[in-house]
Image (spheres, helix red, strand yellow):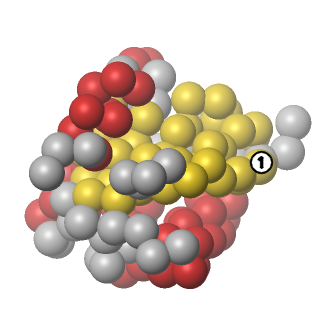
Amino acid sequence: MPFTLSFVSTPQYLEARCSGAATLDDIFTAIDTLAQETVARVTARLLVDLRSVQEQFRFTDHFAIGERTVTRLAHLQRVASLVPESRRTGTSEQVANQKGILLRVFVSEAAAVAWLTQP
């Protein structure tokens, strides 16, 4: 199944739903698209649902994803990433947070939404 990205707007945040087999280039393109969409939709908070993505990323790939997130999504107040427990590494979260992006990775959608919608 090819990689896809779709959006759902809510009053408090933009939700991006990703699915399919993803390469690192697919994720980089998705991050660039997320940057464009959040600016165009004038939103400050973003939920990225990655639970339906199939990937085989290494540590260095996760590090690069964190770096790309920093360069493209710095305008956002909060970014929540939703992943399956088996794929939660914390690497991209750590890189992004060290460089000034408030990014959290969650395995629970309810917890992600609660964090995103805090004042």
Q: Nearer the viewer, residue 60 or 15?
A: 15
For this view, does 21 lie left or right of residue 65? Answer: right
Q: Quadrant of residue 41?
A: bottom right
Q: Residue at x 15, y 71 (%)?
A: 100
Q: Which residue is drawn at 87% across and 36% down?
A: 1
Q: Can residue 89 be seen in this view?
A: no
Q: Nearer the viewer, residue 10 or 84?
A: 10
For this view, does 114 lie left or right of residue 107? Answer: left
The amino acid at mark 1 is: Phe
Relative image position of residue 14 (x, y in whole percent): 49, 55
Relative image position of residue 10 (x, y in whole percent): 50, 49
Relative image position of residue 118 (x, y in whole percent): 17, 44
Q: Residue at x 62, y 43 (%)?
A: 17
Which residue sits furthest right? 1
Counting other residues with Cα less than 10 Å from the Cα at mark 1, is it few (<14), some (14-19), or many (20 or more)? Answer: some
Q: Which residue is drawn at 16% across and 71% down?
A: 99
Q: Name the residue under label 1.
A: 3
For this view, does 45 lie left or right of residue 83? Answer: left
Image: 16 above or below 95:
above
For this view, does 11 lie left or right of residue 21? Answer: left
